[in-house]
């Protein structure tokens, strides 16, 4: 019988782990990392400038024969363009992986030319982002964000609710006026002229039905909405069968918008998704539509949106992303008919630790000969 | 062939509809009310004082032979005790109904002694209240309420997020301190020492599994939680079969609390539910539990809760109801680890209009001979 320790010492492959002075992100409190650090010889290297890193790649003996590259946000101290280092990696490098989704800085195609696989975290954050979309949807229908702010100010539930039933804005504050004393609740629940309704029985349209959009669909179905979607190609029958409820494909956005009580944007940034909601498309919406955005802020022309909110063409807007992020257009900040979150979709312990587990799985998988199609490899 | 108009004029039964100067709630913009007003002879009567109403019941010829009684909040100008009028109702009265759930002011038992059926709206608002429980749950896990307030203050997504990653409170503001510069996200996402996690894969326990609790269970399942519940008797197999996921019955609350990442209270006010969460029971919870309350504020001893929030025994509290409502304990108002809504669970147009449809259905149903067991009658 072989002695595992002796064997593993002889055959351990090296994994380069980049750190920086400002960003330490060594996942040694994640139990899986203990095993990973035993399975491979970990080489920790602190980066400073691009020039220094290229020099190390050329001359530092520790950096001549690594097989895996474990990336964290530390690389960003050298600038955004990571692809500049690709020519200097040793021929032993088989796989590089990072604990997030976007590969913009990495040029996976150039890695591929050198035969190096690149892995990301795939759909790992879909549920967490979809939870934020659900929270925003509930706020868009029920105005929880505004009503909570009133309760925090007044400390009294009756006072906090005393604008529910109002049809106008206070001319000074531009916030909902007090409800008239003889308010008849059977006319419905209004708030500064906006309608407070249940999402139940209403129609939601999701643009972008990837992993996030699908997770959103499941949640909106649970609150009683019927689901339409638009994407480049319709779901296959097998994909549809994985849902316990029907999803209706609408081929064009122009056809989709007039049907919706709620529009949910879950699209990535691309030339096709910039200003999806613009002066022309806003004319097509069903008046009173609510809009939720958890994709990219660039999908909405915010000038057009602000006017549509004023005109009550759009009842409410609830968003985790903004056109000029990190700055928010000041006109949003004081509105009662918007809910605003700070691009926090993926911010959970589960997601951040899960992402590292996926990096370990990508690197260990490739180096141990697992079929890369079963891993999160994006440049096959 | 009979002429329907002539016939109906001869046979129309009277329905008394109470109004008051301050509360007009005549649902004549609800389409179903057109039909209802044609099917019955509507007698509108404005009430002022209890004495005046008793006088009218005894002497006003219009109030001597009504068969149905349609109640709205208007009755409350005469005080809370509606049962005082029961002896004065004519023998022709067969059914009284009101557009809400609670029958506290009505003594359905005394109505029964006179052979008058009493109807309420049953489970009509369950989905709307459950939506609020879901919104509060997401806030309890993700701290959306605090992060939105930071974004509204700063107008900058990066600044709004710069406390995510902090392990302490700022000693001055008692709000989360800034995250340390070398914050390692793989340690998890913290906020002032509280843990920001996904609800996915965590255990929720619902106390009170009536219509609202069941609607909450469906929603929490959709965000990936597993569901335990406590109520007097376990669900029948037929009830369990109506869910597409398992629910685990836990017979005692003492046994339930140590298992939960999230406690959801959906119990009505009763001697058994007052101070369910108290000095003894808080010792049983799994440290770090989150608590959501959409039942009655009396279920929680808020002194005990506030201490548990400070001690991090309870991570967060998110509630639509409060112990001393309408006043909120001031200490809650500035906390970052609570989400506060102004008892708004049932406030939607759908619910308020749906409740009137249920009143019409109760009254018309009884008077047209529908089996009362198929209606919302509560004193059979």
Image (cartoon, coloured by chain):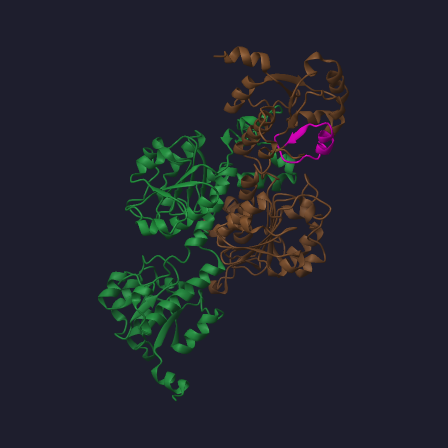
Chain colours: A brown, B green
Q: Nearer the viewer, residue B81 or A231?
A: A231
Q: Is residue B332 above or below residue B180?
A: below
Residue A118 in the magenta stretch? The answer is yes
Residue B13 in the magenta stretch? The answer is no
- Extent of the magenta region: A99-119
Residue B229 locus on image (x, y percent) = 35, 43
The answer to whether one can see residue A380 in this image is yes
Is residue A13 rendered to the left or right of residue A106? left
Residue B299 locus on image (x, y percent) = 35, 43
Quadrant position of residue B182? top right
Is residue B19 rendered to the left or right of residue A307? left
Residue A10 locus on image (x, y percent) = 58, 12
Q: Nearer the viewer, residue B218 or B188?
A: B218
Which quadrant would the C terminus of chain A be assigned to in this image?
top right
The answer to whether one can see residue A329 in this image is no
Residue B259 locus on image (x, y percent) = 37, 34
Residue farthest toward the left in the current orientation of the protein: B113
Q: Is residue A43 above or below residue B101?
A: above
Quadrant position of residue B311? top left
Quadrant position of residue A289? bottom right
Residue farthest toward the bottom in the current orientation of the protein: B1
Is residue B344 rendered to the left or right of residue A44? left
How many circles with numbers are drawn on the protein?
0
Residue farthest toward the front in the current orientation of the protein: A1
Q: Residue at x 28, y 46 (%)?
A: B232
């Amino acid at each position: 019988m072989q002695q595992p320790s002796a064997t593993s010492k002889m055959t351990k492959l090296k994994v380069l782990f980049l750190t920086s002075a400002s960003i330490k992100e060594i996942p040694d409190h994640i139990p899986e990392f203990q095993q990973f650090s035993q399975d491979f010889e970990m080489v920790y290297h602190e980066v400073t400038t691009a020039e220094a890193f290229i020099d190390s790649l050329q001359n530092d003996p520790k950096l001549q024969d690594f097989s895996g590259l474990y990336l964290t946000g530390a690389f960003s101290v050298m600038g955004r363009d990571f692809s500049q280092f690709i020519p200097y990696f040793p021929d032993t490098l088989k796989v590089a992986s990072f604990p997030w989704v976007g590969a913009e800085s990495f040029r996976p195609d150039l890695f591929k030319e050198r035969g190096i696989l690149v892995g990301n975290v795939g759909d790992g954050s879909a549920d967490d982002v979809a939870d934020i979309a659900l929270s925003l949807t509930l706020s868009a229908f029920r105005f929880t964000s505004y009503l909570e702010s009133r309760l925090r100010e007044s400390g009294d539930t009756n006072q906090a609710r005393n604008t529910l039933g109002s049809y106008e804005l206070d001319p000074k504050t531009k916030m909902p006026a007090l409800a008239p004393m003889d308010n008849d609740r059977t006319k419905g629940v209004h708030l500064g002229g906006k309608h407070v309704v249940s999402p139940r029985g209403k129609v939601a349209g999701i643009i972008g039905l990837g992993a996030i959009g699908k997770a959103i669909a499941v949640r909106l179905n649970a609150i009683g909405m019927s689901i339409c979607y638009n994407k480049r190609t319709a779901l296959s029958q097998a994909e549809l069968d994985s849902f316990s409820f029907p999803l209706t494909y609408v081929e064009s956005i122009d056809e989709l918008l007039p049907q919706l009580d709620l529009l949910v944007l879950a699209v990535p940034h691309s030339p096709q998704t910039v200003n999806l909601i613009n002066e022309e498309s806003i004319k097509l919406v069903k008046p009173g539509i609510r809009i939720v955005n958890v994709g990219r802020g660039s999908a909405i022309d915010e000038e057009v949106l602000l006017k549509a909110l004023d005109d009550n063409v759009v009842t409410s807007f609830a968003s985790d992303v903004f056109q000029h992020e990190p700055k928010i257009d000041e006109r949003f900040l004081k509105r009662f008919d918007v809910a605003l979150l700070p691009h926090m979709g993926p911010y959970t312990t589960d997601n951040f630790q899960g992402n590292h587990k996926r990096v370990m799985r990508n690197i260990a998988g490739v180096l141990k000969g697992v079929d890369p199609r079963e891993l999160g490899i994006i440049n096959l």
